[in-house]
Image (spheres, grey):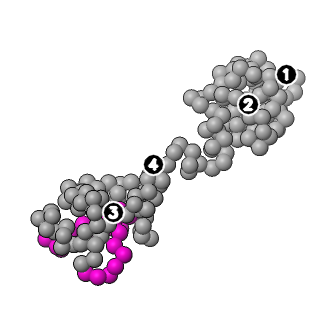
Amino acid sequence: MTDQTFNGTDLLRVLLDEERLQVLGLLSLAPRSVTELAQATGMGTADVRHHLRALRLAGLVANESTNQNSPYSFDVAGIQALKREFFAGPTENLSDDEKTLHAFVQDGKLVSIPTKASKLPPVLDWLVELFEAGRRYPEAEVNAVINQVHEDHATLRRLLVDYRLMERAGGVYWRV
């Protein structure tokens, strides 16, 4: 791929041209020169060069030579890089904290309490956001809020206090 960065919209613009797709389709079968592509498509060589330049900048085709009529080819490495960039799995581009949340929180529910201490902070940070800052909660209300996302309200309530995300006094809790 080139130094130019393509976003999804740019790539779609390149691919939404029928003539470009025709050129790309021919190159996916075998490397071809500008002249061969012009003959196969019925386009002029200037038009073929224009389309090849756009396809090359998008990382879809490659041309290793500066020779006027050297063959262009389907850029498999470029296609794979685009695939990784645009179709990355749900956690490939996430921070470690986001990956932790993705693993432990699904559909707004905490599926399990992390056992590793390093995984707890992002989960507890997510959990404490369920409580309004500046508001005081009786213990029963804290339990009810936590029960909306996980059944072990006692453990989670204690962890929120232990990690100093909430304070308690006289059976009343509040966010720190």
The residue that disc 3 covers is: 74
Tag 1–tag 4 contact (CB < 8 Å): no
Q: Amino acid at mark 2?
A: Ile
Q: Which residues are magenta?
A: 44-68
Q: Amino acid at mark 1?
A: Gly
The residue that disc 2 covers is: 113
The dot on residue 171 is 1
Q: Earlier in the sequence, mark 1 or mark 2?
A: 2
Separation (CA) of disc 2 from disc 3: 48 Å
Tag 1–tag 2 contact (CB < 8 Å): no
| Quarter occupied by residue 91 | top right
The dot on residue 87 is 4
- Magenta residue check for 54: yes
In depth, the one of 173 and 15 nearer the eye is 15
Which-is-in-front pick, marks 4 and 2? Answer: 4
Separation (CA) of disc 1 from disc 4: 49 Å
Separation (CA) of disc 4 from disc 3: 19 Å
Q: Earlier in the sequence, mark 4 or mark 3?
A: 3
Which-is-in-front pick, marks 1 and 3? Answer: 3
Q: Residue at x 33, y 63 (%)?
A: 74
